[in-house]
Amino acid sequence: MNNRIDRRFQALAGKRRSALIPFLTAGDPDPGWTVDIMHSLVAAGADVLELGVPFSDPAADGPVIQAASERAISKGVSLSLVLKMVSEFREQDQDTPVVLMGYLNPIERYGHAEFARAAQAAGVDGILLVDCPPEEMAHLGGELDEYGLYPICLVAPTTTAERMKKIASQARGYIYYVSFKGITGANRLESTSLDKPMAELRAVCDLPLAVGFGIKGPESAAAVADVADGVVIGSALIEQLAGAGSQAEACSLASDFLAPIREAMDNSRL
Amino acid sequence: MSTETEFATAPSFEPDQQGHFGPYGGTYVSETLIHAHEELKEAYFRWRQDDEFMARLDADLAHYVGRPSPIYWARRLTEVAGGARILLKREDLNHTGAHKINNTVGQALLADYMGKSRIIAETGAGQHGVASATVAARLGKSCVVYMGEVDIHRQAINVFRMKLLGAEVRSVTSGSRTLKDALNEAMRDWVTNVDDTFYIIGTVAGAHPYPVMVRDFNAVVGREARRQMLAEHDTLPDALVACVGGGSNALGLFHPFLGDQDVAMFGVEAAGHGLHTKEHAASLCAGRPGVLHGCRTYLMDDDAGQIQHTHSVSAGLDYPGVGPEHAWLKDTGRAQYVGITDDEAMQAFHQLTRLEGILPALESSHAVAYAMKLAAEMRPDQTVLVNLSGRGDKDVQTVAELEGISL
């Protein structure tokens, strides 16, 4: 089991614990703070980190992540800088899986093979590309595989049963279930609506199932943790961080935000 | 019937099942929208073979749009250019004043057949927004048009037209606040309201089947032109010229001629302040392949893969990508792509207005400018057919401001 994502979910399954997966836009609010915020999130109970690679045209994201991306780009954050951040994170943390989440064009510009090599060298474990469905992954997917990087696939409420099977056959690491029809950060999640898709997915897929979009805090996270193997929280965290005036403040905001969520998730599983 | 209904196309220029034109095109969208594209693909390829659907489309094009549009021989313009005969395909005479209506009439009819009650659209110059609001009004559907804040300011008349037609115009303040950002916002709306909403994309970009569908609906321009040339001028044109932003009017004209090897094709991009500057919108002339808005195509980005801001005097050409079929036509050499600067376009705008009494859209003025250059290098017995894709009434404010005239 070479990939940190597999190892982490395996360990969590043993403890009957759901993974807490915070998402933050790399370089926001400040490029120099990201690595320390990542460590703070891990200390507060994060199991997997999703690091957003800022893109100028984030068509699947809501206003919070759009604004975070614009801020990061304006401060010079690029895919190569994000890889440097992961390398730096790995100097102190060899175990927490890191998934890069973003859009295809920055990788197109970097070069598929060059990117896969550099991402592996930096210590990245998985790649989630919002605008690259499995059908279009043939070339990049081969390169990722070559370097042991997992393609993390999305499944949505509009995904047909037949398509779920196809996605399940290509996905590695975990499945990211998009909890509703909409963009990131919208406030529409009802965890009861998750029972059916989770059951459908489990019937065709052995991978852990993480749920994201619309999870705001301890209560919604705990409800999702009851039915899913992982809980992704993005926009709500980024909103918290946006108010930070210093690195120390950003780190304590991150940890104050995440710790109660961890606690609520663990309690709901007892 | 006054217009041909069949979508006969050159087989070698059709995309594969997933919408790939060579390495370009495809379906680069989020998982939530995959089903919507599948549904649209199924509906489109089904209904375009249906006699009743096509008869209704034909009737709309004839009696509502006002087709066929004439081909006009611009004699005085030809004289000034000095060379080949310059002919204009008068899409500016269509209802709502541009070629855009050909596509929106088709997509709105499809929305109706699919039972969608709500229409959304993005717009740059406002022409596609007006054309979408128009067909929504006619079919009694609600309509939301996304438009960049910058474009709202430079196209105030079209914004008011859309509102008169009952559409809600939503100002987009993210990113560069122009067409590309309006597209992002429309995608976000669609992903949220996918059950009852039909997204009318205004150009031959986006994910499959949009590039094919928008091309097919606009190809009535080229089919008519081909027939008119043979009937009225006893020959096919030696060259076709059309402006290219996303590229729908160009592809509409080019496509039915693709099999005619002797017909040269020139797509004219906005060179803004010059291709040597960063202030232009010429993705085919000066960009490179990448992925944006659902498809792989030529685009303008920086070394980190961030999409760059573009510039053109004409809002309708101010877009950093281009339809994937154009990317393929460029690579295969079947069509050539050139740039015309703001200044050259403005000069052509005035020339056509004063010489022929036709006030062209600033977008179309780019095509006119290049056609004059091209004609000058050709013989008087040759012909250049220009797609005069829209009329310039919407641009008079912009022209006045540029020339320091207060109205």
Image (cartoon, coloured by chain):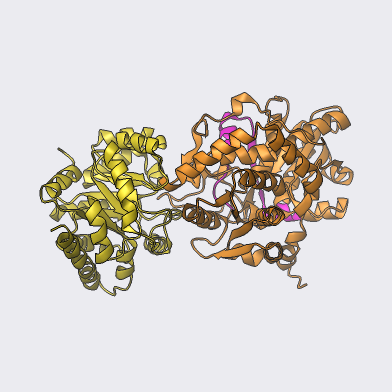
Q: Which residues are magenta?
A: B319-347
The percent coordinates of residue B338 (x first, y second) are: 64, 42
Q: How many marks?
A: 0
Q: Where is B238 relative to B293, above or below?
A: above
Q: Is residue B324 magenta?
A: yes
Q: Quadrant of residue A267?
A: bottom left
Q: Quadrant of the N terminus of chain B?
A: top right
Q: Nearer the viewer, residue A10 or A120?
A: A10
Please name the color used to draw chain B.
orange
Residue drawn at (57%, 65%) of the image:
B171
Q: Where is B68 relative to A93, above or below?
A: above
Q: Quadrant of residue B210?
A: top right
Q: Is residue B3 at all visible to an observer of this figure?
A: yes
The percent coordinates of residue B206 (x first, y second) are: 54, 44
The percent coordinates of residue A34 (x first, y second) are: 26, 61
Residue drawn at (22%, 63%) of the image:
A37
Residue drawn at (74%, 63%) of the image:
B399
Q: Nearer the viewer, residue B212 or B46?
A: B46
Q: Where is B227 relative to B371, above or below?
A: above
The percent coordinates of residue B140 (x first, y second) are: 68, 56
Residue drawn at (86%, 44%) of the image:
B74
Q: Is residue B290 at all visible to an observer of this figure?
A: no
Q: Is residue B121 magenta?
A: no
Q: Quadrant of the C terminus of chain B?
A: bottom right
Please name the color used to draw chain A.
yellow
